[in-house]
Structure formats: structure tokens, C-alpha cells
Image (cartoon, rainbow, N blue to C red):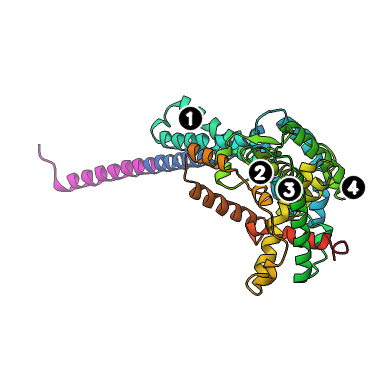
Amino acid sequence: MKISNDKNLSKKIAAAKRVDDRNKDISAKDKKNQNKSSAANAISNNKVSDGRGQRQKESVLTIFKGFLTPYWIVFSAMLLVIMVLNLLARSESFCNSFTANVLPIFLGSYGRFSGLFPFSLGEIMLTLTIPIFLTALTLIILFFFLKGRSGFRKFFKYFFRSLLMTALSVWLIMTMNCSIPYGCSVLEVKKEQKTYSISELETLRNYLVEQCNTYAEQMPRTSTGKVKYDTSTSDIKKEARKVMQEMADQFPRLKGYYPDIKPISHSVLMSQSGTLGIYFPFSLEANYNTMMYKMNYPSTFCHEYSHLKGYMQEDESNFIAYLACLRSDDIYFQYSAYLSVLYYVNNEYYSNVYELDPERYKKQPAISDKVSDDSVFLTKEAKEEIEEKAVFNTETVNKISDDFTESYMTHYGIEDGLASYGRVTDLLLQYYDGILY
């Protein structure tokens, strides 16, 4: 059966309208679903963003909490104390007060502890720096290969934490026992800054030469001409402590406790560097070279003890040791005092007179051969023994030692470095002003 074209067209239009209506409904539903999906995605993204922010906050808090452990609290407190002390060390009055009142407490506690050891604790500490440095270097290299192993990471962490705390402790001790005492005011006799003539220097020089020549003749001697000094080292130490304590009437900081001055086991190396004694601030120990000629013992012991009591300037320590040895009733101490300063004064006089007027120098009392022999640092036999046992070249060791000492002294404001030892001449000129001239 055929249908007319008009009817078919009407049906087609109606059908098309129904399809359009259905499509509109579907589109509306799709848009609604899309809006819901977008809102859900936005909420999800916000949650992810909030989660990331929370994790970042938690990460920062975790790192911060990691530094709130007892180790880092103690570390921070020590570092703060060091910084404050170094700032205060710029004040001369603070340094004077600290060295006079706090250092004796530290010497009576930490110094007594280090004094319990019959050997030099400071020397052991210095010796250990080499293997510790090599161990640290090895661990750093191994870290790149073994960092994945928890056992190694744990050992690595505790090793370097211990090393860091040890280094900080040494810095704190050095600040209290070295940096602050270096900031103290100079001796009263040193403040006068008076200029002395060549004639006055000549008078002082001749007095010391005559004293040395006289004592040299009084000394008992061996068949080889060396001074026969049979007093035990322990008795020399005891006498040194005694006269240093007696000197407190002139220099108050010298009163109180004195530990035993200790022998250095590496005295060969010490002799190669030309060192008679050494003070270790980080262990509060006075030490001496066992290979030096024994006539150096009294003045060297007193010199290092003066450092222990906070007199860090080398010329001041030489001066205090000189006066302390003269206070002793022991003839060896008295002779050692004059020998300890003789060549500082004689060299000063020679440098000021000889080039301008050599005849004037030659007319002065000569230093006797016995005095020259007694004023040596090392005997011929000791030198031979040192060369036999030496591991390093003596000239190299001596140069390294001098360079280090110069740098060390310059760091603490001693601009003339090693030459400052000779400034004891100025102190002697002032001390004998009104006595000899």
C-alpha cells in the first residue's frame, strides 16, 4: 500500500522532533554528569594538594625535631658559649678576671684529672689526630660505595658525631685556657715603656756575664767538664713548684695547684724542632724535652708553669722563670736563671754595638768557655743520638716548627713571633732600673 507524500513528510517531521527531544535530554544529562565529575576532580585535586602541603610541613617538622635531640642541644649550647667567650675575650678586664678566678678552678679539676696520667695526655691526643684523620678520610670514600648498608650508615653517623663533638670540646677548652689568657693585660713592669741607653744595656749585659762566670766556677763537674747535676728530676719539679708558688707575692695568679710537669716521649722530634718545653692548653699540661741539657731543667720548668697559670707571652714567661729560679736556695736553679737570659741580653747588646764600635764590645767581660758549654740546648752526645733516631730531616722539622710557631703567635697578636722571646731584655732593663743603674 502506498502512502501519500504529505503524510510521510508529517511523520518524518514528528519523528525528527522526538529524536531532537531525546538528544536534548541526553545532552543535559551528560552536562550534569560532567559537572559532577569536574567537581569531584576538583575536590580530589584539593585533597592531593592539601596532602602534599601536609607532608611538606611534616617533613620540615621532622627535620627540626631531629635537631632537638640531646646531642644537638648540647652542641648548640657549647657553640653559643664559645662564641660568647670569644666576643668577651676582646675585653682586657674580662680576660684578667676570668684568668684570675675561673682558670684556677679549671686547673684544679680538669688539670688534676689530666695530671693523674703519668704520661703526657696532650701528646697522646696530638698523636691520635693522624689515625683519626685517616679514618675519617677512609670513611668518606667508603660512604659512596656502602651508603646503602644500614650498619655502615649507623657507624658513619656516630663516628662523625663523636668527632664533631670532640673538636668542639677542644675548641672550648682552647678558648678558656689559651685565647682568653692571651687577652690579659701585660705585666706592670712592662707598662712603663721606658727607653734605655746602650750604656745601661751594657751594664745589664756585663752583670749577667759576671754572674754566669762566677756560678760556672762553683759548679761541681764530671771528668768531661759537664756540670755534675745529680738532683733527681722529681726533686727539680718539686723545687720548681715551690718557687713558683712563692712568686705569688709578686704575681698573684701563680698561687695554687701545680700538676707535675711531664716528659715528652717524642723528645727526638722535639729536639729537632729546637723546643725545650711546651704547654698544651687542651690538656692543661706543662711538658719538657727529656733530651735537653739538664741545666735547662729549672728555668724551663718554671717557664712552662707560668704558661699553665695564664702568662702566655713568651717574654713574660722568661722573666717570671728568671725571677723564680733566683728565689730558690738551690745553686743550680740560680745558675739556670742567669743562663736562661744571658744570650738574649748579649745578642741585643752585640747587635747594637758591634757593627758601630767593635772595640767597645771586645773590651767588655767575656763569656767564659764553661758558661758557653753550660748554656747549650743539647750536648754533643744528645745530638748524635737524635741524628741516629731521627725519622725526618732535622732542618725540615725545624723549619716547619718555626713556621707553625710564627703563625700561632701571630694569630694571638704577637706580631714579632719568635723574636718576642728576646723581649725579656726589655723587662730585665726595667727590673734592674734603680738597682744596677
Answer with mark 4 or mark 2, whichever residue precedes in sequence.
Answer: 4
Residue 199 appears in which quarter of the rendering? bottom right
Label 4 close to label 2 by CB (< 8 Å) = no
SS for callout 1: helix
Pick out the residue farthest to the top. 151
Gap between marks 1 and 4, in whole Å?
58 Å
**Residue on which the image places disc 1:** 153
Pinpoint residue 42: horizontal percent, then vertical percent.
Answer: 47, 43
Q: Quadrant of the C terminus?
A: bottom right
Queried whether the magenta region covers residue 199, the answer comes back as no
Most prominent secondary structure in the magenta stretch? helix
Amino acid beneath label 3: Ala
Q: Which residue is mark 3?
A: 216
For the residue carrying disc 3, how many other residues have a C-alpha within 10 Å: few (<14), some (14-19), or many (20+)? Answer: many
Name, please, the residue furthest toward the front: 223
Q: Earlier in the sequence, mark 2 or mark 1?
A: 1
Compare residues 349 and 105 and report the one nearer the observer: 349
Q: Which residue is mark 4?
A: 249
Query: How busy is the neighbourhood of tag 1: few (under 14 within 10 Å), some, or many (20 plus)?
Result: some
